[in-house]
Image (tube, grey):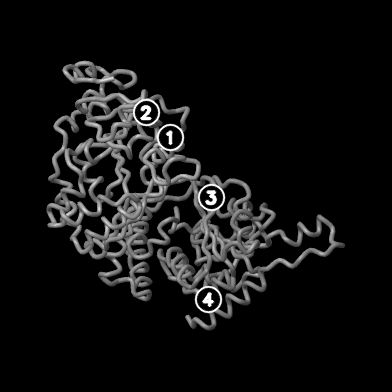
């Protein structure tokens, strides 16, 4: 594709799609008619006699549909007859294959907005053509993919999405990258290449994006679709892989550096609060553990400094009063340290002897258990797994080729506009995110355990705040926080008590 030609095409498209100001003499009805989307519906079809008539009639009933074109791939059944009887214009594809049929439909279309449907659809909700056409007509997008209620198929989940995450992670958000239900500008589609086989839809998605088009997604509800036999799925997966790799090659994304950068991006995405929220479906009780000094005996950065001969430098930085400056300086201190070193320290740092048993009992009592830390996710996630907790929330330390880049990225879950009024970055804000996601009225009980001043707001916010070996007097001065001498003493505060909770707490000292 000639980029100067495409740039000119884009300028022309922007000019064409801007709605002129309405005339003061134009009636309201006339204005609505002028702004209503007019779309050509293109349906590639091969032996679709069972449903093609129903799909054509459905399309024609939508007010945004100006014409329906069925592109027949030389069907051997009654597809052509039933499509014509339903009111479609039928043309014969110039070449066997869905991609060729889609391209032929563009040439025959009389409208700038093209909407593609499959010929084997059923259970369509009303208004899908309008939903797909309106974002194009209003100049919001240049291409729109349909998202629908049915989960992605096996090839989508096992091939398409993983490969997009690897080579085009910016497109991995699309629910149905292989779906044939979509809309686009005729001008844009005419500038793209159409694959002949199963890879046509994902190829168009990638090409539109890399050509600078605005690609969006709309929810069209649920639908029924013919299933593919297993043999076809294998061929489909192979073709999808070939198309994605071909596009990645043209975009210089097949390098080892690119793949490593995607791995790092994926690692960082795991720290986002949205990933945690997906694990809270059906949760009614939450138990949150601080990491340093609560789950672990020692502070992670202190042990990391010992392992990397940086203890003296760290001691100087820990004296800095400003939290943000101190955190940034400590992150920079560990620049050039391999990620493997961070992981080794996290795997070997001493845990409290009853941490695993306590988490196990809490989970048996119906709690979802999280580790919330001001430290680094690369370590917190390992600690979380060591004690068999459900999730971890911490800040992101950036790595480049598995070597620390010395840059800290704060987890947005610690900041919230309507959150803690004392601290811009606070663990209590994480609790607010979790509570909002679950629904405050759905939560039966929340419990948190910490040991230092940076845990105070969180401990005061939950139903039951507990502190172990407190490092700051403020934790003992709060009437709502109880001191415990071992983690398993927390089991005396669960709600309601699970079987065996009392026995587990026997011998544990609780100071109130």
Q: Secondary structure at mark 1?
A: helix
Q: Can residue 231 be seen from the camera position used here?
A: no
> On the image, numbered disc 2 is attached to which residue?
446
Of 184 and 268, nearer the camera is 268
Image disc number at residue 340: none
Sequence-wise first label, 1 or 4: 4
> On the image, numbered disc 4 is attached to which residue?
191
Measure the alpha-carbon separation of dots 3 and 2: 35 Å
Of 503 and 481, nearer the camera is 481
In the rendering, at what x and y percent does residue 489 appear?
23, 23
Q: Secondary structure at mark 3?
A: strand
Measure the alpha-carbon separation of dots 3 and 1: 27 Å
Q: Secondary structure at mark 2?
A: strand
Sequence-wise first label, 3 or 1: 3
Sequence-wise first label, 4 or 2: 4
In the rendering, at what x and y percent does residue 471 appear?
25, 35
Question: Which marked residue is nearer to the observer: mark 3 or mark 2?
Answer: 2
Measure the alpha-carbon separation of dots 1 and 2: 9 Å
Compared to residue 506, the image places residue 42 above or below, namely: below
Compared to residue 443, the image places residue 146 above or below, namely: below
Give yes or no for contact between labels 3 and 2 (Cβ–Cβ under 8 Å). no
Measure the alpha-carbon separation of dots 1 and 4: 48 Å
Image disc number at residue 219: 3
Left or right: 353 in relation to 73: left
- Residue visible at 22% across and 38% down? 293
Image disc number at residue 435: 1
């Amino acid at each position: 594709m000639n980029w100067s030609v495409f740039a000119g095409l884009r300028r022309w498209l922007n000019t064409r799609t801007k709605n002129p100001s309405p005339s003061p003499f134009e009636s309201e009805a006339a204005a609505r008619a002028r702004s209503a989307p007019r779309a050509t519906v293109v349906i590639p079809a091969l032996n679709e006699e069972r449903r093609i008539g129903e799909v054509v009639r459905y399309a024609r009933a939508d007010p945004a549909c100006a014409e329906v074109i069925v592109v027949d791939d030389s069907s051997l059944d009654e597809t052509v007859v039933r499509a014509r009887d339903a009111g479609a214009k039928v043309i014969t594809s110039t070449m066997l294959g869905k991609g060729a049929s889609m391209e032929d439909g563009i040439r025959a279309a009389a409208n700038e907005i093209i909407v593609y449907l499959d010929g084997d659809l059923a259970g369509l909700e009303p208004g899908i053509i309008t939903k797909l056409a309106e974002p194009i007509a209003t100049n919001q997008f240049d291409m729109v993919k349909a998202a629908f209620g049915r989960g992605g198929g096996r090839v989508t989940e096992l091939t398409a999405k993983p490969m997009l995450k690897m080579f085009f992670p910016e497109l991995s958000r699309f629910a149905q990258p292989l779906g044939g239900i979509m809309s686009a500008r005729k001008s844009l589609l005419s500038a793209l290449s159409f694959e002949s086989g199963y890879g046509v839809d994902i190829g168009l998605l990638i090409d539109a994006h890399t050509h600078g088009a605005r690609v969006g997604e709309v929810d069209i509800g649920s639908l029924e679709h013919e299933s593919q036999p297993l043999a076809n799925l294998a061929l489909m997966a192979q073709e999808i892989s070939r198309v994605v790799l071909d596009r990645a090659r043209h975009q210089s994304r097949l390098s080892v550096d690119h793949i490593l950068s995607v791995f790092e991006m994926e690692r960082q995405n795991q720290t986002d609060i949205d990933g945690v929220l997906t694990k809270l479906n059906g949760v009614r009780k939450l138990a949150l553990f601080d990491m340093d000094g609560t789950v672990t005996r020692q502070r992670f950065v202190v042990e990391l400094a010992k392992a990397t001969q940086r203890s003296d430098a760290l001691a100087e930085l820990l004296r800095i009063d400003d939290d943000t400056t101190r955190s940034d300086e400590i992150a920079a201190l560990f620049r050039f340290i391999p990620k493997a070193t961070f992981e080794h320290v996290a795997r070997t740092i001493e845990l409290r002897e009853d941490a695993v048993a306590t988490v196990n009992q809490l989970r048996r009592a119906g709690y979802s258990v999280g580790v919330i830390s001001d430290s680094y996710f690369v370590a917190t996630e390992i600690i979380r797994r060591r004690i068999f907790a459900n999730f971890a929330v911490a800040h992101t330390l950036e790595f480049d080729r598995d070597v620390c880049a010395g840059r800290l990225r704060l987890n947005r879950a610690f900041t919230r506009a309507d959150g803690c009024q004392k601290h811009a970055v606070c663990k209590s804000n994480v609790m607010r995110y979790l509570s909002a996601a679950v629904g405050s009225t759905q939560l039966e009980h929340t419990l948190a355990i910490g040991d230092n001043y940076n845990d105070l707001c969180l401990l005061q916010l939950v139903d039951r705040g507990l502190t172990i070996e407190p490092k700051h007097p403020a934790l003992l001065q709060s009437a709502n926080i109880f001191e415990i001498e071992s983690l398993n003493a927390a089991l005396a505060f669960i709600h309601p008590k699970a079987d065996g909770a009392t026995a587990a707490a026997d011998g544990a000292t609780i100071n109130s």
